[in-house]
Image (spheres, rainbow, N blue to C red):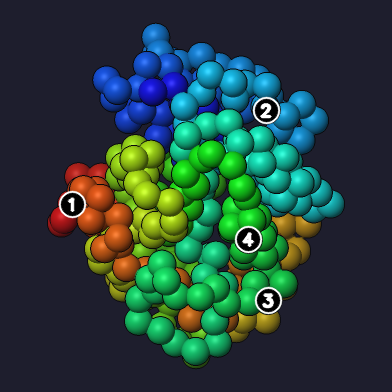
Amino acid sequence: MKVLITGAAGYFGRSILPTLADDPTISEIVATDLAPPPFTHPKLRFERRDLVADGAEDLLPGMDAAIHLAFVVERKPGQDHAALNVTAARRFLTAAAAQVDVLVVASSVMAYGLRSEPFDRLREDDPPGPGRGFYYAEEKLALERMLDGLEGKARIVKARPCVVGGPGVPAYRAAAYRGKAFLMPRTAHPLRYQLLHEDDLGPAFRALLDAPAGAYNVAPDDEITTVEAARLLGKRPVALPMGLCTAFMDLTWRLGLSHLDGGWARSLGYPTHVVDNAKLRARGWAPRFTTRDALFAMAGDSSRRNG
């Protein structure tokens, strides 16, 4: 199998590439991004591409599969993130659907939308909710709607991972887990979440290359609340008023001191996403690590494992 992967130098790409390279059924991997991934292998060929300006459609001939990871997660002030997340994605995915046998696309649990009512665990047949103006949710919803409308030869698989973490997570993302206090907005509901260990991501995407068309949640078995996470890490949980949280995040983001704007805090005003992973487990994938394992790894204490 020959595989083309976009966004290969990002956190997801760095976590997935070693699994693909180790698979004897995969003979070639063509990786695209603005910079080369920090991973080399005889099977791997890097092609520098800006999907917005250059596209990567010309790399599709001869490929059996494509994995589309390229996506602006943390936008910058004034950035036209939709140029990659929507416009360039539509162009690339339309071409890929017509040329490859299988197309695996990184969506998100955010594709379920921001829901007003509490829920237990979301399953793939649960309908999406509204994005409520939160750009990340809106653009993941747009991506899935786009995939639903594509026609071609490809078997289209939508991967819906939860938050992913581990020892390789960028330092600025891990900072919140390594401070003395654990800051969070005050909400009317517990802030539940799942944290998938980065080492479980590659095997999940490899399993999805062989999966029937459709959506698949990618998450560990367990969940945790932010208060529990703080206590496990020996930190003090500090809940701040939502308005203060969002204003502070918006200010620091506009000053270039933070990677996340206030929309991320506002999204936590809705019940947080916890999903069921039974559909992907039925394909033979099983997480090796728990949310707590990934939490300790992000906090710099990977020796603590309880899975």
At mark 3, the secondary structure is loop
Hey, what amino acid is under mark 4?
A: Arg
Q: Quadrant of residue 43?
A: top left
- Image position, residue 74 (x, y; %): 64, 51
Of pointers 2 and 3, the one earlier in the residue sequence: 2
Judged by depth in the image, the label closer to the viewer, 1 or 4, is 4
The residue wearing badge 2 is 57
Of pointers 4 and 3, the one earlier in the residue sequence: 3
The answer to whether marks 4 and 2 mark residues whose Cβ atoms lie closer than 8 Å is no
Hey, what amino acid is under mark 2?
A: Glu
The residue wearing badge 3 is 132
At mark 1, the secondary structure is loop
- Image position, residue 72 (x, y; %): 65, 47
The answer to whether marks 4 and 3 mark residues whose Cβ atoms lie closer than 8 Å is no
- Image position, residue 183 (x, y; %): 50, 70
Distance CA(mark 1)–CA(mark 4): 38 Å
The residue wearing badge 4 is 145
In the figure, is residue 143 to the left or right of 203? right
